Amino acid sequence: MQKKKIMTQDKDRELKAFFQGMKEKDREILIPEFPELVKTRSLNWWIPLGIAASLTIGFFLLPKENIIADPPAEVIIITLQQGENQEQQILIEEKTYLETWESPTSSLLAEY
């Protein structure tokens, strides 16, 4: 046991001496100086400013919604009537509202 302790102590001393020598050699190495301020590429200020200006101009140049005028209060009804002698008459009426509405295809259902 004694021998093992002595051998391990010797190995420990050798290792310590080896690494101490490495540390001393490392201290002798000259380290070059690096610049304090490293310039990084940054986004130019005029790019976001140009985007904002384009959006602002585009907002003002967009067409405005057209205001739809209210429909007239009167309704014009144009009807085509066939008389007794196969003569056709056009009747034009002006009313304030539409009383009845007939589908233009309703006559197809009645005739066929």
Image (spheres, rainbow, N blue to C red):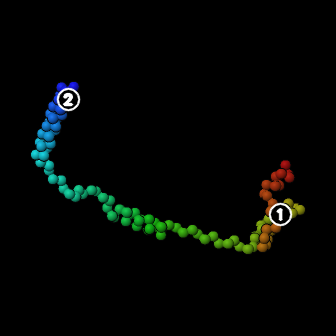
- What separation in Å lies between label 1 and label 2 (alpha carbons)? 130 Å
Left or right relative to 78: residue 86: right
Question: What residue is pinned by disc 1?
Answer: 81
Choose between 60 and 35: the one closer to the eye.
35
Give the class, few, some or many, for how many residues have Cα within 10 Å of label 2's Cα (few <14, many ≥20).
few
Q: Looking at this view, is 33 or 84 the one in front? A: 33
Residue type indicated by callout 1:
Gln
The amino acid type, in three-letter code, at marker 2 is Lys
Position of residue 22 measured from the top left corner of the image (x, y, whole percent):
14, 40
Q: Secondary structure at mark 2?
A: helix
Q: Position of residue 88 (x, y in %)?
A: 82, 63
Which residue is identified by label 2? 5
Q: Return the x and y of residue 47 as percentages of the image width and height.
A: 35, 62
The quadrant holding residue 41 is bottom left
Above or below, 2 relative to 56: above
The answer to which image quadrant residue 97 occupies is: bottom right
Q: Earlier in the sequence, mark 1 or mark 2?
A: 2
Residue under the point 57% across and 68% down: 65
**Height in image: 76 above or below 102?**
below
Tell me which residue sits at (30%, 58%) in the image.
42
Left or right: 83 as drawn, with respect to 61 = right
Image location of residue 32, percent across then percent down: 14, 50
Provide the secondary structure element on which disc 1 rests. strand
